[in-house]
Image (spheres, grey):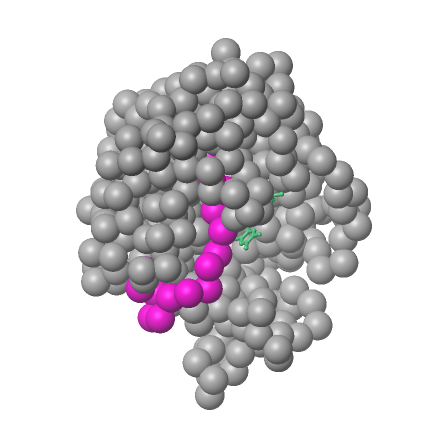
């Protein structure tokens, strides 16, 4: 088995184990996909990646990280997403969408804007952000309102509605974003969840929302199609969410019908010290995989040899690349040549085959 071996998840067969990691483009108006998304994601399908994961796509308008996020809270969003999914499939890749709610990290400006910080209502943001508990993420962030149990139920339904729209848009895979300090992660971590009801306190209670969302997704998403979850394997902070809980939750989510867990880390503690180095999150994916749950590795994976070794040594089932695929959408075509492995080039590009 190598980086270019196909991978079957339920009835979906990925042509190889290279995935485009979800990346916010902050290029939408009112949540709508644009030509930018089609060209950006389409180029990476042309470039040979097996799975193309759309960026964090908000299931509710107030769940957007910025006013410019991609959204799926309205049936009118379906058409633009379908154009992208159809193109990705035409290229032989599998379209996947990351369903997200930013919780207390919502209503922020785009990273490249000179005035970075909270966007007030007068500038297109919103005045109320929500979370597990009324604890702000950090300086410059609004203090969130604690979700009531009824509001939690509404959030769960929004994820279910988003899954139905994803299907209508032709997506083959949905992913629940439960990482990087966004709403689901805010419930998982004792650092951001101080609730005293059935959603806070014990491991059982903090993981309740993630499990309820997955259970509901499985009710509305076809049995023959995969569901993935992205977790932050650790908060990199004492007393926070950690690898042990990640492994346990991954096993429980797998039992509930999750097919693969992507192992990222961090994002819930503003000043956590993260020991960045090539492949620094691979051990998390390896731990989840050795606990019997298919996994994806992500984070500072840039070299063909490195990516291939992760799959060959069975540390993860899929390798996800983000920034390297921004630098080079044709990375898979070049990696195959470098490794001496076979990949089909787009017929239009065959005269350039390496
Ligand atoms: C521009 C940009 C946008 C991102 N947006 C998302 C996102 O929408 N959802 C997500 O889970 N991770 C997001 N990430 C994190 C990446 O998916 C990935 O986990 C991270 O960049 C580490 O991988 P890399 O070293 O290959 O870039 C983003 C990263 C970048 C660079």
As drawn, which residue projects farthest toward the front? 351
Asked whether the viewer can see residue 47, the reply is yes
Q: Which residues are magenta?
A: 19-33
Left or right of 228, for residue 348:
left
Q: Is residue 270 above or below residue 324?
A: below
| Foreground pick, 186 / 212 | 186
- Quarter of the view holding residue 196: bottom right
As drawn, which residue projects farthest toward the top? 1
Residue 194 belongs to magenta span: no
| Foreground pick, 195 / 72 | 72
Asked whether the viewer can see residue 60, the reply is no
- Quarter of the view holding residue 245: top right
> What percent of the width, then of the height, locates residue 150?
39, 61
Left or right of 89, for residue 36:
right
Residue at (48% x, 68% y) in the render: 66
Residue at (46% x, 59% y) in the render: 25
Residue at (54% x, 39% y) in the render: 321
As drawn, which residue projects farthest toward the bottom? 122
> What percent of the width, then of the height, locates residue 112?
58, 69
Q: Is residue 326 above or below residue 286?
A: below
Residue at (25% x, 57% y) in the render: 80
Residue 26 belongs to magenta span: yes
Main SS, magenta region, reads loop
Tell how many labels. Answer: 0
């Amino acid at each position: 088995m190598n980086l270019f071996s196909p991978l079957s998840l339920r009835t979906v067969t990925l042509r190889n184990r290279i995935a485009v990691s979800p990346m916010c483009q902050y290029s939408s108006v009112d949540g709508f996909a644009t030509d930018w998304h089609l060209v950006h994601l389409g180029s990476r399908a042309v470039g040979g990646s097996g799975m193309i994961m759309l960026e964090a796509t908000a299931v509710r308008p107030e769940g957007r990280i910025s006013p410019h996020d991609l959204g799926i809270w309205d049936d009118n969003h379906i058409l633009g997403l379908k154009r992208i999914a159809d193109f990705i499939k035409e290229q032989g890749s599998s379209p996947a969408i990351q369903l997200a709610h930013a919780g207390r990290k919502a209503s922020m400006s785009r990273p490249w804007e000179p005035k970075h910080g909270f966007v007030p209502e007068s500038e297109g943001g919103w005045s109320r952000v929500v979370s597990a508990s009324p604890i702000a993420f950090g300086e410059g962030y609004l203090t969130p309102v604690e979700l009531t149990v009824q509001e939690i139920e509404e959030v769960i339904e929004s994820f279910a509605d988003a899954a139905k729209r994803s299907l209508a848009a032709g997506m083959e895979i949905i992913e629940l974003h439960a990482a990087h300090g966004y709403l689901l992660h805010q419930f998982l971590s004792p650092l951001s969840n101080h609730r005293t009801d059935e959603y806070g306190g014990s491991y059982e209670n903090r993981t309740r929302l993630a499990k309820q969302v997955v259970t509901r997704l499985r009710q509305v998403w076809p049995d023959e199609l995969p569901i993935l979850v992205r977790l932050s394997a650790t908060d990199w902070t004492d007393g926070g969410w950690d690898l042990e809980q990640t492994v346990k939750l991954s096993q429980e989510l797998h039992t509930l019908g999750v097919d693969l867990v992507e192992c990222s880390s961090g994002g819930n503690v503003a000043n956590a010290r993260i020991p960045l180095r090539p492949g620094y999150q691979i051990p998390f994916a390896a731990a989840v995989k050795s606990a019997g749950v298919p996994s994806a590795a992500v984070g500072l994976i840039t070299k063909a040899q490195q990516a291939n070794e992760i799959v060959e040594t069975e540390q993860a089932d899929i390798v996800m690349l983000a920034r390297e695929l921004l630098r080079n959408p044709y990375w898979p075509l070049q990696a195959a040549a470098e490794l001496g492995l076979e990949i089909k080039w787009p017929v239009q590009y065959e005269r350039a085959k390496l």
